[in-house]
Amino acid sequence: MTKRFSAQREMIRDALTMLDHPTAAQVYDHIRRAYPQISLGTVYRNLGDMAAGGEVLRLSFAGAPDRFDMNTADHCHAACVWCGRIFDTDGSLPAALLRELDAAVEKSTGIAVQSRAMLFSGACADCRPVH
Ligand SMILES: [Zn+2]
Ligand SMILES: [Zn+2]
């Protein structure tokens, strides 16, 4: 990897850490403020490579652009319908529970689960008092 490419990766990693489960377009918007030379295509390509390499998670939710996540541990997402923030479940929702769910899905459908596109939604703790 050349120096320039690794610098781009570094900026993408920083953006993913600072932003909340961003789309590729949000990563691009964040980076181009400091580095206007970068193109949306470069960001897409890097995110795709990073997702394929297991460095980031690609989250596909129906009817919405893919989002990217630096947290590669097996976890679930919950979105606030009011402020749009996406929250990670913590380690207390064990991966074992997810594997149990996978097994139940396989038993019921015959599909050996490789990935899930699950999104829980509702009002977050900040928004709940006003809605
Ligand atoms: Zn909220
Ligand atoms: Zn996450």
Image (cartoon, grey):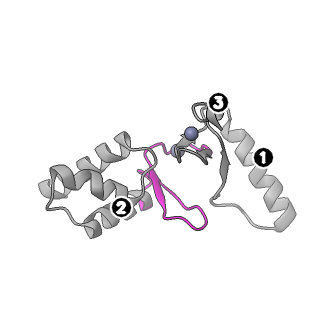
Q: Which mark is residue 129?
A: 3
Q: Which mark is residue 100?
A: 1
Who is closer to the viewer here, 65 or 96? 65
User: For numbered disc 2, what is the local secondary structure?
Assistant: helix
Placement of the N terminus among the 4 image quadrants: bottom left
User: For numbered disc 3, what is the local secondary structure?
Assistant: helix
Task: Please state if 67 lies on the left or on the right of 125 as rendered.
Answer: left
Q: In which image quadrant can residue 76 be found?
A: top right
Q: Which mark is residue 121?
A: none
User: Whole-percent x and y of residue 15?
Assistant: 31, 46
How far is the residue under mark 3 from the one under mark 1? 34 Å
Q: Is residue 89 magenta?
A: no
Classify mark 2 as within 8 Å of ligand 2 or not, answering yes or no.
no
Q: Nearer the viewer, mark 3 or mark 2?
A: 3
Dot 2 or dot 1, earlier in sequence: 2
User: Whole-percent x and y of residue 111?
Assistant: 75, 67
Placement of the C terminus among the 4 image quadrants: top right
Q: In which image quadrant can residue 123 be found?
A: top right
Dot 3 or dot 2, earlier in sequence: 2
Q: Is residue 68 magenta?
A: yes
* Neighbours of disc 2 within 10 Å: few (<14), some (14-19), many (20+): some
